[in-house]
Image (cartoon, rainbow, N blue to C red):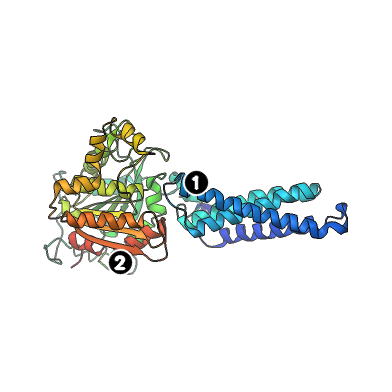
Amino acid sequence: MNAWWQGISLVGGPLPFVIDLTQLLLVLSVVTLVVLDRRRGTTHRRRRLIVVLGSGVIGGAVGLALCWLLSDQLNLFEVALSPTSRSWVAAAFAGVGIAVAAIALTGWRGRLVAAVTIATSLLAGTVGVNADFGQYTTVGSLSDHAVAAPLPASVLARQALGAPGSGRRVTVAVAPSSSRGSDRAAVSRITTTALHGLVGSVAIPGTVSHFSARRAYVYLPPAALLTHPVPLPVIIMLSGQPGSPGNVISSGNIAAIFDAYARTHNGIAPIVVAADQLTAPQNNPMCVDGALGNSATYLTVDVPTWIRTHLTVKTASADWAIAGFSQGGTCSIQLGSQYPSLFSNIIDVAGQLAPMNGNLQHTIAVGFHGDAAAYRAATPEHVMASKAPYRQTVAVFGAGQLDARYGPVAAAMSVAARQAGIHTTRVVSPGTAHDWHTVQWVLKNALTPIYQHMGLQP
């Protein structure tokens, strides 16, 4: 059981409000202390007010300049910061600027309040940017260990009884419900008023790849929790970079989104496996086999083998999807286009045109053993052109309306996919940027072509 405080929201509710209100009150207090500091005499109040407010303006300008330098020029985050995030950074630096001025203009009491104001301003800015990006939704999500407990052994054992190759395949009552006549279990024991799946962590070893992956997370919909689990489709989903499998669950709000789908589909939804393609937040193996680890083999061999061995799933490629956000979206189109016999469903949310780790020279060196031709051959556009025409692959490309950098990439990638014969859907999340809000919107509103291909709905 997680402690109660781990469920406190970082993107809404009382905590962000209290932090923002505290910052505002502290800034006002600092300004008041500076202006009313009698130690300096009453004749200079206006001058001190101009100095402290000017320091706030300069601080805000410095914050915006840093956003421009780090995001737009150096591309340190590999994403353009949204106007909302820039505003939070500017507000934080404005508070710091006012506090720094107060330290120079007041006595020890003012300096003490100013020091607290600096810390609170930086905290408020951090919370604001995080709320805009949607990376950490609760206090508990700051640590992967608090996202979910290990998947219970009893649930895994029950799942394994119906896993492909177990020799004890579960027989379920089915009714035709789609154009390809796929299974749709009559899960009569599940009520439509209280459908809840289960999320748990699991260890998926790099048996073949020797990839040092972190623990994965599995979402099992209600139909997977029956005494005799229903064989279900699979979505392997990847975080962005920096990121972790836990971000997929917490930031992606996976349980709530797929529980909502299950409530209207008799308890049935895809099983979601949030796997690790990075090994650590700062690493980016680019979902290839290279000097940074055999990420591609892990995701296309080790993870699917573990899923088929331990979970009751369908085995046709039409029932398997690879999905991801940002760097994970790049991985999705890379692997989905390269291995259509494994994944014939692709969900690419705000991915790149090609794998990238720093500049092009570094990318080729660490990911492709210095072979520029191998790099070009591995880019999704080249792969799709070489394997065209695709006859069974379905892809959804999504991006936020305010994502100036990766919105055009999604549009270009969808054109290339369509030209290669992939059944392509391009969607735009209204009012969002390069953030997890976009991911949630795509998962809630844009997966109908995937569900239809999986036979989950007409």
- At horizontal 25% and vertical 44% (from top left) the residue drawn is 379
Labelled disc at residue 225:
none
Q: Residues within 10 Å of mark 2 (few under 14, many from 20)?
A: many
Q: Quadrant of residue 310?
A: top left
- Quarter of the figure with the C terminus: bottom left
Nearest the camera: 123 or 182? 123
> Is residue 114 left or right of 298 when viewed as pictured?
right
Residue 314 in picture, x, y percent from top left:
18, 52
Kind of residue at badge 2: Arg
* Furthest residue in direction front, as rendered: 73
- At horizontal 33% and vertical 61% (from top left) the residue drawn is 442
- Dots 2 and 1: beta carbons under 8 Å? no
The residues tagged by marks 2 and 1 sit, at their Cα atoms, a distance apart of: 44 Å
Kind of residue at badge 1: Leu
Residue 326 in picture, x, y percent from top left:
36, 50
Q: What residue would you read off at disc 2?
A: 263
Labelled disc at residue 70:
1
- At horizontal 80% and vertical 60% (from top left) the residue drawn is 46
> Is residue 169 left or right of 66 when viewed as pictured?
left
Question: Mark 2 or mark 1, which has the lower sequence index?
Answer: 1
Q: How many numbered marks does the figure carry?
A: 2
SS type, badge 1:
helix
